[in-house]
Image (cartoon, rainbow, N blue to C red):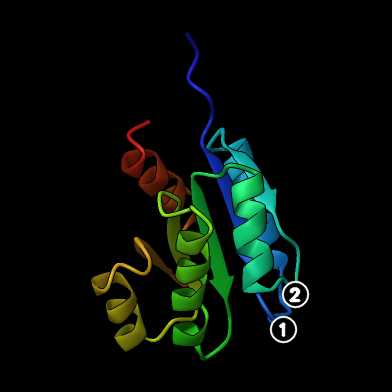
């Protein structure tokens, strides 16, 4: 019996305006990683991201940001996911995230992994496959 593909949501939140890298990553996850990918588009609220991730039954949300306020974005999204029944959805972070915030987000379990700016698509794909043991 064939295993269903990993389902990933690539998300952009709030007023974060640059979606080019998110679109490129979404394409790589699909084409190179064999994953089902949902791209939210720009200007999504955390509530919209959480709701859509549950509706689409995703395994992982990869939220990319370019703001200087990751602690105002990731913890509330984790809460939204958990409150809606998405506690099993793996939340990952990517973009420009200061080291102190990266460590805090991972240590507290808000996100499972922070992908530093410049992480290759291949590196992200490999991590996802290892994490989900596919």
Which numbered marker is on residue 114?
none
Q: Are marks 1 and 2 in contact (CB under 8 Å)?
A: yes
Question: Quick one: 37 or 34, which is closer to the camera?
Answer: 37
**Residue 38, percent across and down?**
67, 48
User: Which residue lies most toward the top here?
Assistant: 1
Question: Quick one: 105 or 53, which is closer to the camera?
Answer: 53
Q: Residue at x 52, y 80 (%)?
A: 73
Question: Quick one: 59 or 25, which is closer to the camera?
Answer: 59
Q: Residue at x 39, y 44 (%)?
A: 126
**Residue 60, percent across and down?**
49, 50
Establish if 91 lies above or below 28. below
Q: Residue at x 47, y 75 (%)?
A: 74
Q: Upstream in the sequence, badge 1 or badge 2?
A: 1
Is the residue marked by circle 1 packed among few (<14), some (14-19), or many (20+) residues within 10 Å?
few
Establish if 31 lies above or below 100. above
Q: What distance separates the C-alpha of mark 1 from that of mark 2?
A: 5 Å
Establish if 36 lies above or below 86. above
Q: Is residue 103 visible?
A: yes
Q: Which residue is mark 1?
A: 15
User: Which residue lies most toward the left here?
Assistant: 107
Is the residue marked by circle 2 packed among few (<14), some (14-19), or many (20+) residues within 10 Å?
some
Q: Which residue is mark 2?
A: 43
Q: Which element is circle 1 on?
A: loop
The C terminus lies in quadrant: top left
Numbered label tally? 2
**Residue 70, percent across and down?**
48, 83
Left or right of residue 112: residue 83? right
């Amino acid at each position: 019996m064939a295993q269903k593909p990993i389902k990933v949501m690539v998300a952009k939140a709030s007023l974060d305006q640059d979606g080019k890298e998110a679109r490129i990553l979404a394409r790589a996850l699909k084409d190179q990683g064999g994953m089902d990918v949902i791209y939210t588009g720009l200007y999504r609220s955390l509530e919209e991201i959480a709701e859509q991730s549950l509706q689409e039954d995703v395994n992982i949300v990869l939220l990319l940001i370019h703001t200087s306020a990751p602690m105002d974005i990731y913890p509330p999204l984790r809460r939204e996911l958990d409150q809606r029944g998405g506690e099993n959805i793996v939340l990952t972070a990517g973009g420009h995230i200061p080291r102190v915030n990266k460590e805090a987000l991972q240590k507290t379990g808000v996100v499972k992994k922070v992908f530093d700016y410049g992480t290759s698509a291949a590196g992200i794909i490999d991590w996802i496959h290892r994490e989900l043991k596919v």
